[in-house]
Image: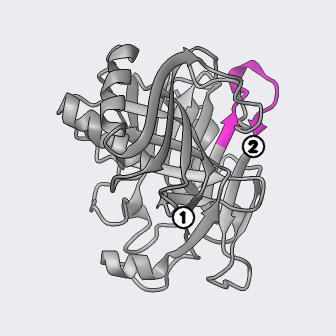
Amino acid sequence: MAKPDEKSFPLQFKDTHVPDFHEVKKVLLDGLKKNFMVASVDVITCPDLTQSPWDLASPGICGSPRIVDIGGVPYLMPVPNKSKLYNLAEVARLVDLPGAFIIGPGAGSSRVVGKNCEMIVNAKLAGDGGGSDNIKSWIAKLPDDNDRTKYVVESYQSLEGGPLMNLFASEGKQGMVLEVKVKSRTGPENFITCMRKQLASHYGDKPVAMGGVFLIAKGKANLHIMPDFSDKPLNTAEEINKWLTFHDMSAPLVCLCEFVSHDPDLDLRIEHTHCFSNHGDGGHYHYDTTPEEVEYHAILVLAEKIYRVDRPQETHQLGRD
């Protein structure tokens, strides 16, 4: 239950289909081999993700894993609703995981940053047990002069984001995870889309949800960074792509992701990934641009639930790629 000084948002949730890890291992591998020259999937004990190259705020991604889909693109376009802001501590309590480790993509708070921006959430919350939050989140934005050819990636020590966030939450513990390694893309799909479509093909209308972290260890990738809010309504995919800024960024990139094979009538964004680095690159991941050179290394787990927070009443499918 929300505390007296907290906001209360409409909430829906559904259980996911959680198949055996070894079954999922085989399903994913079958799809990845069609899209990459080299592919492996293993079930391992989660490495310490606080260490390089991962640099996350908690050592693991296990323990009550769940997808938390907050707000949505309809609050951003065609016209932005700047009042849609969400505090991660409030959201964590709402989804019954007050001390959550939360990772994933979203929009940063324009109230905090002063403009629209990409947010890369990486935070272990103290919860109700006291202590301090460990916030290692980032934002990617255009510079103050709004030069569309340049961008700024910097530390973000706030728990506020909005108007959309697509997050993966857990207790932040180490446990059994899926380790995925691929090299040299030969097919048309990006890394996440390939796995999501393979799960959808195998499991049909059973929603299988996954989240975690992957490293683009070699190569380059196409990422976008949102400029400040548009002063004109964005009504088409063409208008959205003209508004966004796209950039070729270099490995190593640490990418925080969540994806769902089938939307169980929750109006989800079924895949979303944001990346950060220690060399000034980061933003919203689309695909790699050096297919022969690229290498991916992922640590993923299956989510047990999907929580839908503050679902837009008026919706559309624009801007969800």
Residue at 61 percent of width and 26 percent of height: 98
Q: Secondary structure at mark 2?
A: loop
| Residue 23 placement, left or right of 296 | left
Q: Which residue is mark 2?
A: 136
Q: Secondary structure at mark 1?
A: strand
User: In the rendering, at what x and y percent does residue 121 appear?
Assistant: 63, 46
Vertical order, 239 against 116 (above or below): below
Residue 133 visible within the image: yes
Which of these two is toward me, 64 or 160?
Answer: 64
- The numbered mark, 1 or 2, whose residue comes first in the sequence reads 2
Three-letter code, disc 1 = Leu
Q: Which residue is mark 1?
A: 223
In this view, which residue lies farthest toward the right?
131
Segment colored magenta: 122-136
Q: Residues within 10 Å of mark 1 (few under 14, many from 20)?
A: many
Three-letter code, disc 2 = Lys
Q: From the viewer's perspective, is the residue at label 1 or at label 2 nearer? A: 1
Does 283 lie within the magenta span?
Answer: no
Residue at 61 percent of width and 20 percent of height: 46
| Residue 69 placement, left or right of 268 | right
Residue at 44 percent of width and 66 percent of height: 76
User: Which quarter of the rendered picture does the C terminus lie within?
Assistant: bottom left
User: In the rendering, at what x and y percent does residue 61 appear?
Assistant: 59, 25
What's the distance in space between the residues labelled 1 and 2, CA to CA?
20 Å
Which of these two is toward me, 238 or 292?
Answer: 292
Residue at 71 percent of width and 28 percent of height: 58
